[in-house]
């Protein structure tokens, strides 16, 4: 193969970006990618790092780490090895490993650093065939994007238009060594089944099948990009600052447009796109459920919910209804499940400080009647939450300040009459500092 054309193609896709993190498995594809980048390093002032994910799924995993370290030492590329636990959770081993891998990479990626992965043309063809098997629409048939946002950075697949045979020719020409994962020979996995048994037959009959398939994927991606552009204003008009979607606006649209907007709204969360029947369930079981219901539909780690004629997509959270935290103000209190922390401003005015013998606790569940400041009568706390427009899922994730067994306040939401200072009692202000 023409090495200069190969390297020039990678250079063009980098577009002057210098800080690179390479996902390095030690296999053929990532070995070629890393080697090619190193050849370009000095000329283009590239800063290259590599990351290897140790899944622990193979008995050879430790020896793979040693191989990757040796290669990176030889190429003078810093390598980070990250161990992850793979929990399939009913979603399949392949999917679970992929999720764990990208989560680990995201935690290590530096600001402004470009992530590079080594998927190639044959991988894209397999992805397209798997999408056909699932009955995917144009979005699924678009396959893998050559470049896409990844967390706060970007992900680039610079080998996506290059066949595996060309990569192997490069590797042999440069006398590279690489890992052969024994699990790649297990055709119980769908992708391996296609690679080992289906694609060879297709390529023998039609030698350019993989490149034709990737062109089809690219055309589907173009159409999806055009739809994204045409529907962006409509989606923005239906979405509020909380990223929830206006149900009334969707109801007045045709079914085709409604589902197109729903897909783009979901894609903005970085969630794996649900199938058509799953989208129909979101609409029928969540959006169209009876008015007094609190419907929800779980898909993987996410849940669809409705509140006051708006549709929400939320990450599943840890139940906190039985959680009790003992607090010693004015020290900060770190809240569980990434809810931020509580801080005390001793110079502020808001609620009385605890009296002698009153232990301060923070809880996430309350029941019965309370009387809040600004109201003349006590009301059930469920009614107060409703009046204040707090969605049901936020009611058990809002910290509640208790003095002994008396509810005092929900910081930033309400203060009860029991929090009012008497006889010049000292006061303070409690602030809930949420994570962004």
Image (tube, helix red, strand yellow):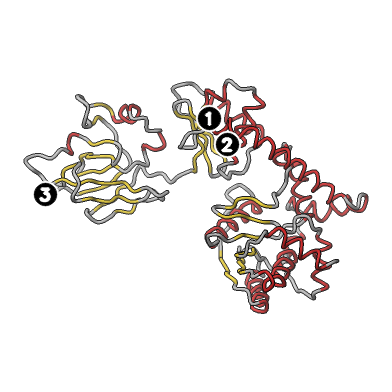
Note whether 77 is above or below 211 in the view shown.
Answer: below
Name the residue: 80% across, 74% down. 174
Please tell me whether mark 3 sits on a helix, a strand or a loop.
loop
Q: Using residue 278 as the reference point, say whether residue 292 is left or right of it.
A: left
What crowding class fits label 1: few (fewer than 14 Cα within 10 Å), some (14-19), or many (20 or more)? Answer: some
Q: CA distance from mark 1 to mark 2?
A: 10 Å
Lower sequence index among marks 2 and 3:
2
Label pair 1/2, CB-CB below 8 angstroms:
yes
State the image quarter where residue 162 is shown: bottom right
Residue wearing tag 2: 265
Residue at x 18% of width, y 39% of height: 419
Vertical side of 297 occupied by 335: above or below: below
- The residue that disc 1 covers is 238
Q: In the rendered structure, which disc, 1 or 3, sits on the residue that comes first in sequence?
A: 1
Above or below, comparing residue 197 to residue 253 in the picture:
below
Characterize the local packing of mark 3: few (<14), some (14-19) or many (20 or more) Cα atoms within 10 angstroms: few
User: Which residue, given by chain and number where applicable, does mark 3 sit on?
Assistant: 356
Q: Residue furthest left?
A: 423
Counting from the top left corner in percent of width and height, residue 394 is at 39, 38
Disc nearest the viewer among 2 and 3: 2
CA gap between label 2 and label 3 equals 52 Å
Query: How far apart, in angstroms, are the residues tagged by discs 1 and 3?
Result: 52 Å
Secondary structure category for the residue under label 1: helix
Residue 273 spot, x, y in % from top left? 63, 40
Which residue is pictured at 12% across the width and 47% down the height?
426
Query: Which element carries disc 2, helix, strand or loop?
Result: helix
Q: Which mark is residue 12?
A: none
User: Is residue 136 at least partly visible in the picture?
Assistant: no
Q: Is residue 196 above or below residue 374?
A: below
Query: Residue 207 at x, y = what percent?
Result: 91, 53
Q: Quadrant of the N terminus?
A: bottom right
């Amino acid at each position: 193969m023409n090495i200069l054309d190969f390297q020039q193609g990678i250079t063009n896709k980098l577009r002057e970006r210098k800080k690179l993190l390479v996902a390095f498995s030690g296999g053929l594809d990532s070995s070629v990618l890393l080697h090619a980048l190193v050849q370009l390093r000095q000329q283009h002032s590239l800063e290259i790092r590599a990351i290897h994910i140790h899944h622990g799924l193979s008995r050879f995993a430790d020896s793979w780490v040693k191989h990757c370290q040796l290669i990176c030492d030889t190429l003078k590329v810093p390598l980070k090895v990250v161990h992850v636990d793979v929990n399939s959770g009913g979603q399949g081993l392949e999917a679970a490993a992929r999720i764990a891998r990208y989560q680990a990479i995201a935690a290590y990626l530096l600001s402004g650093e470009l992530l590079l992965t080594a998927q190639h043309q044959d991988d894209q063809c397999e992805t397209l065939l798997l999408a056909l098997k699932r009955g995917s629409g144009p979005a699924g048939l678009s396959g893998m994007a050559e470049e896409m946002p990844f967390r706060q950075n970007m992900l680039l697949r610079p080998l996506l238009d290059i066949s595996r045979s060309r990569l192997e020719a490069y590797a042999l020409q440069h006398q590279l060594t690489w890992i052969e994962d024994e699990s790649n020979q297990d055709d119980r996995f769908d992708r391996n089944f296609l690679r080992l048994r289906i694609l060879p037959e297709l390529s023998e009959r039609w030698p350019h099948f993989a490149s034709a398939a990737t062109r089809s994927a690219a055309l589907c991606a173009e159409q999806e990009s055009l739809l994204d552009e045409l529907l962006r204003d409509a989606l923005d008009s239906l979405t509020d600052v909380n990223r929830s979607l206006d149900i009334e606006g969707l109801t007045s649209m045709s079914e085709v447009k409604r589902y197109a907007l729903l897909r783009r709204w979901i894609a903005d969360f970085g969630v794996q796109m649900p199938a058509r029947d799953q989208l129909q369930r979101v609409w029928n079981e969540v959006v169209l459920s009876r008015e007094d219901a609190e419907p929800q539909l779980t898909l993987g780690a996410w849940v669809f919910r409705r509140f006051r004629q708006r549709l929400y997509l939320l990450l599943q959270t840890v139940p906190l209804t039985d959680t009790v935290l003992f607090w010693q103000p004015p020290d900060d209190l770190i809240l569980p499940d990434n809810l931020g922390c509580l801080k005390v401003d001793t110079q502020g005015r808001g609620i009385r400080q605890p009296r002698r013998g009153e232990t301060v606790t923070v809880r996430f569940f309350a029941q019965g009647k309370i009387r809040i400041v600004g109201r003349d009568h006590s009301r059930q706390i469920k009614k107060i939450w409703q009046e204040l427009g707090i969605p049901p899922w936020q009611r058990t994730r809002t910290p509640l300040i208790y003095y002994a067994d008396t509810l005092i306040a929900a910081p930033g939401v309400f203060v009860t009459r029991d929090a009012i200072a008497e006889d010049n009692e000292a006061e303070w202000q409690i602030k809930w500092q949420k994570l962004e």
